[in-house]
Amino acid sequence: MTYPQFFLYLAITTAVAAGLAALAHSFLSISFAWPLTVGIIVLMCLISVALFFLGKRTAGAENKFLFSNVFMGATMIKMFACGGIIAAYIFLAKPPGKFFIVPFFTTYFTFTLLEIIFLVILAREGKDDPVETA
């Protein structure tokens, strides 16, 4: 996957996530959660870019476990960060309703789908080297 392809996919994913979030905000009375929604979209964009660069760098590495270790580590960090952000938002902002989670999860799942797509493509590119036989 080339850099322009990735950034095209990222732009499409960001537009879809923003559209789904705007749709959720228009149908649900969660206008208080706009800062959380925008912050999560920006955070997911940054995490996706970082994961792409790390994945691109490790896909062709000599250590074949490095790519999967980077993917698993980044996924774990992303999950814990998002859980912490939601917990902090609940405790600090004390939102009047619980539906603020809808745009959060649509954004999370949209960017997770993007990450799965580009990591599968990168993993396939990394396996292009011929297998050495003894």
Image: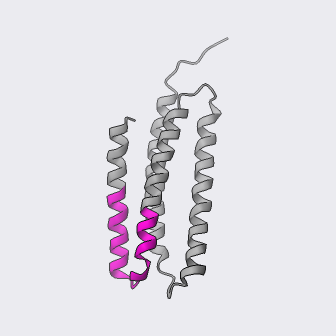
Q: How many marks can you see?
A: 0
Q: Residue furthest top?
A: 134
* Vertical arrangement, residue 41 with respect to residue 123, above or below: below
Residue for point 33% across, 72% down: 22
Q: Quadrant of residue 89?
A: bottom right
Q: Residue furthest bottom?
A: 96
Q: Which residues are magenta?
A: 14-41
Where is residue 51 drawn, in percent x and y? 51, 45
In reply to whether residue 28 is colored magenta, the answer given is yes
Figure coloring = one colour
Q: Quadrant of residue 45?
A: bottom left
Residue for point 34% across, 81% down: 27
In the image, taking residue 115 as reference, residue 134 lies left or right, namely right
* Vertical arrangement, residue 70 with respect to residue 58, above or below: below
* Vertical arrangement, residue 36 with respect to residue 30, above or below: above
The chief SS type of the magenta part is: helix
Residue for point 62% across, 61% down: 80
Residue for point 47% across, 69% down: 104
**Quadrant (top left, top right, bottom left, bottom right) of the C terminus:** top right
Where is residue 131 drawn, in percent x and y? 58, 18
**Quadrant (top left, top right, bottom left, bottom right) of the N terminus:** top left
Where is residue 69 drawn, in percent x and y? 64, 41
Q: Residue furthest front?
A: 92
Where is residue 56 drawn, in percent x and y? 48, 35
Q: Quadrant of residue 133?
A: top right
